[in-house]
Image (spheres, helix red, strand yellow):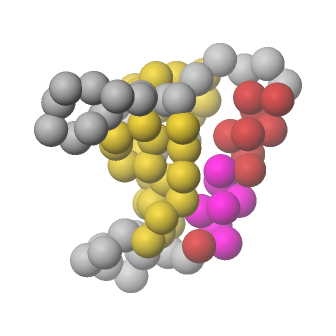
Amino acid sequence: MLIFSQNKKQITDCKTLCVTKNIGGNKEEKFVIVGSAGITADITGGSAILASFPDEKTALDALEKIFTAFENGATSYRL
């Protein structure tokens, strides 16, 4: 699924998405959605931070919305 990042700076063809704690983030960026394109040879390992949130619940709600869109046949999603 193509995901357009929250900051509008990247589009990632994601194979997996996860919510994780953002170590060192400010109070508005404590949790992030990370998307992975799978195994790649670049230094990021094919992963990208796609969005940041102040708390885990808000991040999980956003992840749920992405999954609902996927279930309904969407091939792309804007954060």
Percent position (x, y) of residue 24? 25, 77
User: Does residue 37 show up magenta in the picture?
Assistant: no
Part of the protein shown in magenta = 57-63
74 up-or-down from 29: above or below: above
1 left or right of 48 in image = right
Q: Which residue lies furthest to the right in this view?
A: 72
Q: Residue furthest left?
A: 43
* Residue 7 seen in the current view: no
32 left or right of 67 in image = left
Percent position (x, y) of residue 14? 49, 29
Question: What number of labels is visible?
Answer: 0
* Residue 10 seen in the current view: yes
47 up-or-down from 53: above or below: above
1 up-or-down from 22: above or below: above
Q: In which quarter of the image is residue 9?
A: top left
- The C terminus lies in quadrant: top right
User: Does residue 60 show up magenta in the picture?
Assistant: yes
Percent position (x, y) of residue 64? 74, 50
Percent position (x, y) of residue 57? 67, 72
Please give the name of the residue rendered at 66% of the width and 61% of the height, measured from the top-left corner: 60
11 left or right of 2 in image = left
Please give the name of the residue rendered at 17% of the width and 30% of the height, measured from the top-left corner: 42
Please give the name of the residue rendered at 82% of the width and 29% of the height, measured from the top-left corner: 71
Q: Quadrant of residue 72?
A: top right
- The N terminus lies in quadrant: top right
* Main SS category, magenta section: helix
Please give the name of the residue rendered at 79% of the width and 19% of the height, measured from the top-left corner: 73
